[in-house]
Amino acid sequence: MNQLLANLDPAKIPAHVAIIMDGNGRWAKARGLDRSEGHMEGVNTVRRITEIASEVGVKCLTLYAFSTENWNRPQAEVDALMHLIGFAIQRETPDLIKNNVRLTMIGDMPRMPLDARQRLQQCFDDTAHCTGLVLNLALSYSGRWDITRAVRLLAEEVSAGRIAPGEITSEMLAGHLSTASLPQQDPDLLIRTGGDLRVSNFLLWEIAYSEIVVTDKYWPDFTKADFIDAILAFQRRERRFGKTSEQLHP
Ligand code: FPP
């Protein structure tokens, strides 16, 4: 582990890492357990990865904990997940404060059950003064939901006569997304566990130039070393943002 950490280039730590935490269900099934036990084990991974992200100096960690589409899962699984999220957030709050981690969320908060909402709000308030890692949970979130919401907000400004349609810029649209207040809006690195090669309606606008690392490991099996490996893979990439390699290294 220390050897792995020593290989990191401290000047090229991704400021914003986003993770699609997939494979809890398959992890549980492989062990003959209920899917909810996979989610419970997944919470331990959330704790580990929050710790290591904070340790290496990542500024913002966005975790896809519950998508807009996840509301369509069997009600018992939705209920178990909502309970687990509220319970885990409350239990982890003292450690978040101790580690100077600030909790935020993106997503359709009013759609969350009251109990989870209250526990989340308590944790937002209790960690509001923390200045280290921003742990940003995507809950009842999808990229299309967020873009649609931003377009509605802009349309309201147009209909109020504050801006003309032709004045709308991509920066203005970005400024109306729920990610606008994060320390850095666009993830440098997107990690997906569970092996599937898709983005599943996550941060559609923001991942335009993110480097993507997919691992076959299920989320409950994802270790600190796997996280460092993903950052090392990121550091080996050449980010061209549409330019040629020659332009970047004249
Ligand atoms: C995807 O695995 C995982 C989820 C939909 C939920 C992830 C939630 C947690 C790990 C809990 C988060 C808790 C906090 C406190 C942030 P899947 O069920 O789709 O797995 P599968 O693809 O194997 O079926």
Image (cartoon, grey):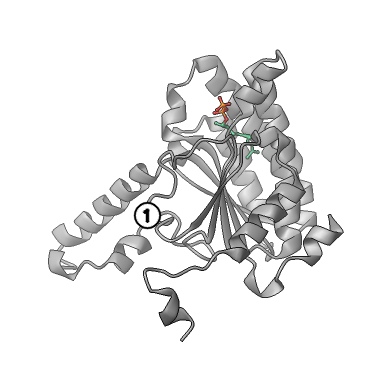
Q: Give ligand 1's quarter of the image.
A: top right
Residue found at the very far top of the displayed protein: 32
Please state which of residues 24 and 8 is positioned toward the viewer in this rendering.
8
Left or right: residue 88 versus residue 161 is right
Q: Up-down: is 230 above or below 239?
A: above
Q: Up-down: is 200 above or below 178?
A: above
The residue wearing badge 1 is 205
Toward which corner of the image does residue 101 lie, by quadrant?
Answer: bottom right
Please state which of residues 94 and 46 is positioned toward the viewer in this rendering.
46
**Could you tell me which residue is drawn at 17 percent across and 61 percent down?**
158
Q: Amino acid at mark 1?
A: Trp
Q: Up-down: is 14 above or below 17?
A: below
**Could you tell me which residue is drawn at 62 percent across and 65 percent down?**
235
Asked which secondary structure carries label 1, the reply is loop
Report crowding for label 1: few under 14, some 14 to 19, many 20 or more residues within 10 A (C-alpha): some
Q: Could you say where residue 162 lies in the image, as x and y percent from the top left? A: 19, 68
Left or right: residue 112 versus residue 63 is left
Please state which of residues 22 and 134 is positioned toward the viewer in this rendering.
22
Left or right: residue 56 versus residue 80 is right
